[in-house]
Amino acid sequence: NIRGVKIFSELGDKELKSIADICKEQKFKKGDIVIRQGDVDETVSILMKGELQTEIEIPGFKESIPVYTFKPNEVFGEVAFISGAQRSATIKCLDDTEITILDRSKFNKLCKKNPNIERIMMKNIAVLLSERLRHTTIQLCDGISKLPSRVVSRKARSVFSELSEWVNTMKGISSV
């Protein structure tokens, strides 16, 4: 059931059914890779059951870095869905998992019949992306602030200071 998923909020029963009709369900086992960093496709997925770990591979590092754990009803792959860009992270199953997948080409056909679906979903995806950007910026600021001062150059400290001010402003806005 996709009703509780943020990117589908504000859609009516008929619109939700239209979307559900073009989605496909897929099951994975613990340890399976759902998405591999660098792959290209134009789907967005919803975690229905289980947990997924997002990991980023960074050149020069031996191991990938875990960055986020998805819980049921969370969405992933929205950037590739919108832009067709390469996947920016690998997503691995932490346990047996069920996901619902929405393909961009099928979605485009649906939106030709009902443009309101696209308008609402893209607005919701924009909100989701801004929340994730804010969260990532806060994590980055927190990580930089823990570095020894000798590691952080004067210029980096200046940028960090400006970024911290922006984050504090965003925290204030998000609590309103």
Image (spheres, rainbow, N blue to C red):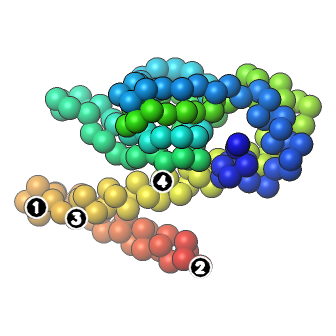
Residue at left offset 55%, top offset 55%? 130
Can residue 172 be seen here? The reply is yes
Mark 3 belongs to which amino acid?
Ser
Q: Earlier in the sequence, mark 3 or mark 2?
A: 3
Can residue 91 be seen here? The reply is no
Q: Earlier in the sequence, mark 1 or mark 2?
A: 1
Q: Is residue 23 above or below residue 1?
A: above
Horizontal relation, residue 59 to residue 164: left or right: left
Residue position for label 1: 148
Mark 2 belongs to which amino acid?
Val
- Residues marked 1 and 3 touching at CB (< 8 Å): no
Mark 4 belongs to which amino acid?
Leu
Return the x and y of residue 25 as percentages of the image width and height: 64, 27
C-alpha distance separating marks 1 and 3: 8 Å
Residue position for label 3: 145
- Residues marked 4 and 2 touching at CB (< 8 Å): no
Q: Earlier in the sequence, mark 3 or mark 4?
A: 4
C-alpha distance separating marks 3 and 4: 18 Å
C-alpha distance separating marks 4 and 1: 25 Å
